[in-house]
Image (cartoon, grey):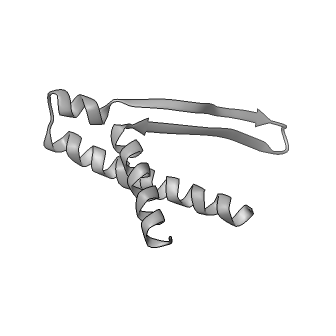
């Protein structure tokens, strides 16, 4: 079970990275207009960095995820490619 979860996390992360790269590329090629807004707008979700200072040790917790249309398409493409290759 743990191996399957790790594979899913890797597929999502790789897909999101490639999708984000593609979205940034598209938004620089099309600097204005509908296509730029479609790929440049993002939704952020998560926990803002929170600091815990215990005088002896200082810990920072947080995890933010930023999704845009390109990252979602990258995740879907990565999942489909993974399914085709390792079926």
Q: Residue at x 44, y 50 (%)?
A: 75
Q: Residue at x 14, y 44 (%)?
A: 29
Q: Which residue is at the front of the view, 84 or 51?
A: 84
Q: Position of residue 43 (x, y in %)?
A: 44, 29
Q: Residue at x 59, y 55 (%)?
A: 9
The image quadrant of residue 4 is: bottom right
Q: Which residue is at the front of the view, 58 or 6?
A: 6
- Residue at the far bottom: name it: 86
Q: Position of residue 78 (x, y in %)?
A: 42, 58
Counting the numbered discs, the total is 0
Q: Left or right of 67: which side holds 40?
A: left
Q: Looking at the image, is 87 positioned above or below residue 73? A: below
Q: Which residue is at the front of the view, 73 or 85?
A: 85
Q: Left or right of 44: which side holds 31?
A: left
Q: Position of residue 69 (x, y in %)?
A: 35, 37
Q: Residue at x 84, y 37 (%)?
A: 54
The image quadrant of residue 61 is: top right
Q: Looking at the image, is 26 positioned above or below residue 31? A: below
Q: Looking at the image, is 73 positioned above or below residue 47? A: below
Q: Left or right of 59: which side holds 80?
A: left
The image quadrant of residue 37 is: top left
Q: Position of residue 41 (x, y in %)?
A: 33, 30
Q: Quadrant of the N terminus?
A: bottom right
Q: Left or right of 77: which side holds 7?
A: right
């Amino acid at each position: 079970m743990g191996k399957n979860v790790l594979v899913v996390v890797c597929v999502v992360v790789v897909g999101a990275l490639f999708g984000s790269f593609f979205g940034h590329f598209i938004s620089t090629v099309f600097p204005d207009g509908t296509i730029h807004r479609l790929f440049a707008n993002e939704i952020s979700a998560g926990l803002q960095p929170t600091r815990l200072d215990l005088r002896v040790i200082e810990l920072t917790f947080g995890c933010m995820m930023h999704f845009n249309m390109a990252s979602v398409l990258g995740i879907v493409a990565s999942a489909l490619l993974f399914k085709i290759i390792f079926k």
